Image (cartoon, rainbow, N blue to C red):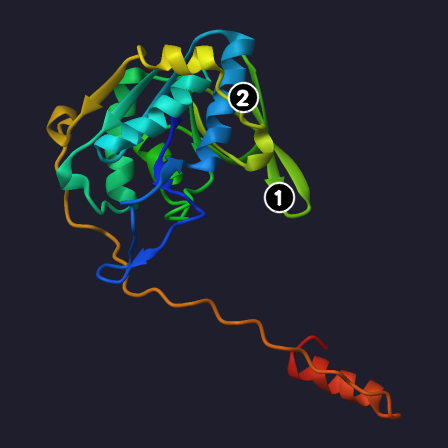
Amino acid sequence: MKIVVTVKQVPDPNSAHVLEADNTLARDKEVVLDPGDECGVEEGLQLKEAHGGEVVLVSMGPERAKDAIRKGLSMGADRGILITDEKLAGADAFTTAQALAAAIKPESPDLVICGTESYDGSTGMVPPILAELLGIPQLTFAKKVEVNGSALKVNRQTSDGYMVVEATTPALITVTAAIAEPRYASLKGIMAARSKEVKQLTLADLGIDRGESAETIQAIVDAEARKAGSIIEDDGTAVDQIVKVLTEAKVV
């Protein structure tokens, strides 16, 4: 079973800040493997341990993004692919998915695993675009995955429980943090990761060109502060006051 896991290097959640010049996150300081992608790597490794095969990590980013791949390799993944090209700086979701798809297609994976959304972008748009470009079904918000031959069954997390969704491989799934607790890399794993292959590809290698961005960031504003509630004193008219508030809120 060949499993491809998409991974991304993101600014450390504890030290991230926005650049005023272009409304993007600064990436010149501490960077880490996206925590959500760590869960995806762990699920890929568990499926490999259960069914055999190979786990390949695919990422897009600058040269230093190789460190994020090495983190996944130290956990136990087999090899990595890094798409790195100056032309991809500031790429939007479609361009990112297009590059990932071009790198993943030649691998002909049985399963592609993605995080639900990246920490830095938080759009959740790349996985569905990627699935469409690869021409495979997408099963989202997976909290549990079962594979039996080519049959794939996913417990899809919802706000009030979960639903069971089935498909046949090849397929793409997005996983939640509930899917698995990422393992710590052992010293042996860290040492082994240094010798594992990380293939680097450019847009020319992939045979694609970057077009005009389909999305741009117009502005970033602080979230509206939560307003203080009001206290209704029970002076004999409390019921009427509550009904009035609920009516204005269109609750009743």
- Residue positioned 65% across, 79% down in the render: 249
Above/below status of 233 relative to 167: below
Residue 149 visible in rendering:
no
- Residue positioned 32% across, 14% down in the render: 194
- Residue positioned 34% across, 36% down in the render: 9
Helix, strand or loop status at disc 2: strand
For marks 1 and 2, give the CA distance: 19 Å
Residue 88 visible in rendering:
yes
Q: Quadrant of the N terminus?
A: top left
Splitting the image into 4 quarters, where does residue 2 fall? top left
Is residue 197 toward the left or the right of residue 246 in the image?
Answer: left
Q: Quadrant of the C terminus?
A: bottom right
* Image spot of residue 31 (x, y percent): 35, 39
Which numbered disc flags the more N-terminal residue, 1 or 2?
2
- Residue positioned 35% across, 35% down in the render: 8
- Which sits in the foreground, 185 or 208? 185
Label 1 Cα crowd, 10 Å radius (few <14 / some 14-19 / many 20+) = few
The residue lying furthest to the right in this view is 236
Specify the amino acid type for callout 2: Leu
Above/below status of 232 relative to 179: below
CB under 8 Å between discs 1 and 2: no
* Image spot of residue 160 (x, y percent): 68, 46
* Image spot of residue 127 (x, y percent): 39, 37
* Image spot of residue 179 (x, y percent): 58, 30
Label 2 Cα crowd, 10 Å radius (few <14 / some 14-19 / many 20+) = some
- Which sits in the foreground, 17 or 109? 17
